[in-house]
Amino acid sequence: TLPTQIFHLLLDREIVRHNDEGAYYASNSLWDAMSFLRRESNPADLVFAAGSTSTLVPAFAGNTVLWGHWAMSVDLEQTLRWQDAVFGRGATEEAGRELLKAGMKYVLVDDAFRASFGDPAPEFFTGYNKVFEQGEVAIYRSEKST
């Protein structure tokens, strides 16, 4: 049984090392992004992030998110249909306009965002300015923000 135990130990070590969807730890860059949001934004400001990151934003940055947990969504199916309509064609200028229309003041892009929606092209951020970047994490704020 010893080889099996060693195999599982090594396998689990790799899973934790890859930190899929931020399940085991948040990077220093993500912590710094949360600190930035806490300092620079209003708690009522809407933040758009990947589902796994969205669960952290209210707790650590204090902001409102599109979804904080799948079971807390008022209408999960409608939210998922909207997400598919916006991002199903890829992260285009249309996606950025949809986020603006939905009232998203901030967009938090991290590895989980890229895994969910792909790496957004520059035209995705039409209407947004980059206000934070560190490592793999960037935050964009609506140009309508003061």
Image (tube, rainbow, N blue to C red):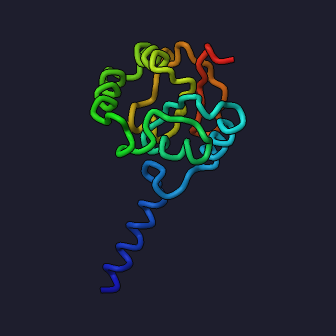
In the image, residue 24 above or below residue 122: below
In the image, residue 96 above or below residue 72: above
In the image, residue 19 above or below residue 71: below
Picture quarter with the N terminus: bottom left
Residue 88 as seen in the image, left or right of residue 94: left
Picture quarter with the C terminus: top right
Q: Quadrant of residue 144?
A: top right
In the image, residue 55 above or below residue 92: below
Who is closer to the viewer here, 43 or 130?
A: 43
Q: At x 52% / y 13%, what residue is drawn?
A: 126
Q: Position of residue 24 (x, y in %)?
A: 49, 58
Q: At x 45% / y 66%, what residue is drawn?
A: 13
Q: Position of residue 112 (x, y in %)?
A: 45, 41
Residue 92 as seen in the image, left or right of residue 127: left
The residue positioned farthest toward the right in the image shown: 39
| Count of picture labels | 0
Residue 146 as seen in the image, left or right of residue 127: right
Q: Quadrant of residue 143?
A: top right
The residue positioned farthest toward the front in the image shown: 74
Q: Position of residue 42 (x, y in %)?
A: 65, 31
Q: At x 64% / y 49%, what residue is drawn?
A: 28
Q: Position of residue 67 (x, y in %)?
A: 43, 37
Q: At x 35% / y 28%, what residue is drawn?
A: 83
Q: Quadrant of residue 114?
A: top left
